[in-house]
Amino acid sequence: MSASTPSESLTQHNAPGASPAPSAAAAAASGSAPASPAPSAGAGPAGTTTAPFPEGFLWGAATAAYQIEGAATEDGRGPSVWDVFSNTPGKVFEGHTGNVACDHYHRYKEDFGLLAELGAKSYRFSVSWTRVLPEGTGKVNQKGLDFYDRLVDELLRLGIVPLCTLFHWDFPQALQDRGGFLQRDVADWFADYTTIVAERLGDRVPWWVTQNEPQAFIGNALLEGHFAPGLKLPYRDYLTAAHNQMRAHGKQVDALRAAAKAAKVGYVLATQVQRPATEDPGDVEAAREAIFSVYERHPWNNAWWIEPVLEGRYPESGLKLFGKDVPDFPASDFDQIKRPLDYLGLNMYSAGTWRRGKDGKPERVASPPGYPRATLDWLQVVPSTLYWGTRFFWERYKLPIGITEHGTATRDQVFLDGKVHDPQRIDLMHRYLLGLARAVKEGVDVFGYWAWSLLDNFEWAEGYRERFGLIYVDYQTQRRIPKDSYSWYKEVIATNGRSLLGPTAVAWDNVTG
């Protein structure tokens, strides 16, 4: 694309569960849909333009329990696999642990004050399973549930819509010791835990996620060994664990439907976006085929993790590739796995590039030398990621889409002026959100965007080396310092994206790098 002014007349449509301002948060909190469509796009008052995102759009930020809460042994919390893993020498960068992290357990009101000052409409958080059930099953820890009661009530007091993720990787160590995801009982363990949390919070939390990024907590953790519990299982066992993970998801959906009848229920992928090298129809179809195929023997695909959940079958490309490693299981398992969902949560950071090869098959295109990337090598800066990711998933599944994570890692620091300047994060978010605005303009049903992350935090095996936050955390003093990106994102939220619009000196999408 050439340098241009992004369109200032972008089609609007309603987010599921959203309503016109000023009562958008209240409507989303109730899970109700609007009675009438949003106003059509067009010129606003003199000197303004119509916002590129729909009224009631859920602008927010996201976190995960183990990454921010700390208080690892406080008030009856039991150990998760991440407690054991991070406290094992050599597993995490420089021996960092989540024992204290951001001390959010004690500082959540301060953090939510900053969230409210940001103008966030929604907040995505996760529940620590072992804070609620220290042994994974059995006796409930009331102090743990009380914490999440207080957390949700404080969000609602501030007019912020809660989105609760039930599982964000911190699997109970006690259940891991009983076989973990290799046991078929794991589906019932998940269902029982889900029921307990949903019965407590379901009257106030309208949006739910069953599980976050199975590619990571199954593939990265049980096949590649980089994440807790750090196993390198044989391929057949890894696929067995993945199968049981999806059975667990299905039972979680049933538990949520029973305990929180008004809940909007979704499932979140570590979305492996594939974009076309050009907008030639052949390249677009090549990228579309790649994004919904299993083309290599590793966990980093979408099809293996989403087709059983939405279509009740494994993808033929994966069955062919994995062959005899695919475990035996009753056909009736798909009756447990396949469940209607209200939306898809897509965590999207980067994308691969594909074109139609000379043989007619999809062909990956390598990035040129010097292509921009974040401090994490896998995070290349591909601004059209949110456009192509949402477009392809919407066209295939016709489910509303929430961008449940998006952001970037930079090596932030406090400058001599006492501030934290992060222009790379601002530029990346600006570019990607212009791509998302294009998807919305073209009719893709996107209802919310949750920046990753509200706070700098424990970045899993990277420890505290990588910083994703809109707010800088000094881990020695626990001081919070909003970064430049915080102020920038505040304006995006306040204008519903109008601040993104305007002329650019270069193309917003760095197609050629």
Image (tube, rainbow, N blue to C red):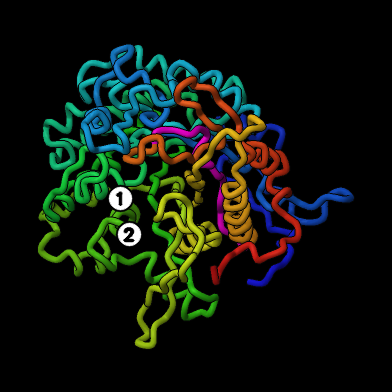
**Which quadrant: the N terminus?**
bottom right
Instruction: Identify the mark at residue 301; answer none if there is no mark.
Output: 2
Q: Is 455 in the magenta?
A: yes
Give the amino acid type for the residue marked by disc 1 in the picture.
Answer: Gln
The residue lying toward the viewer, choosing from 276 and 339, is 276
* Residue at the disc numbered 1: 215
Question: Which span is picked out in magenta?
Answer: 442-458
Give the amino acid type for the residue marked by disc 2 in the picture.
Answer: Asn
**Which quadrant: the C terminus?**
bottom right
| Residue 414 seen in the figure | yes
How far from the left and from the top, in percent, is residue 292? 36, 65
Which residue is located at x 60 percent, y 40 percent? 59
Instruction: Name the image quarter holding residue 193.
Output: top left
Which residue is located at x 36 percent, y 36 percent? 463
How far from the left and from the top, in percent, is residue 202? 43, 26
Q: Is residue 22 left or right of residue 479?
A: right
The residue lying toward the viewer, choosing from 334 and 5, is 5
Q: Is 330 in the magenta?
A: no
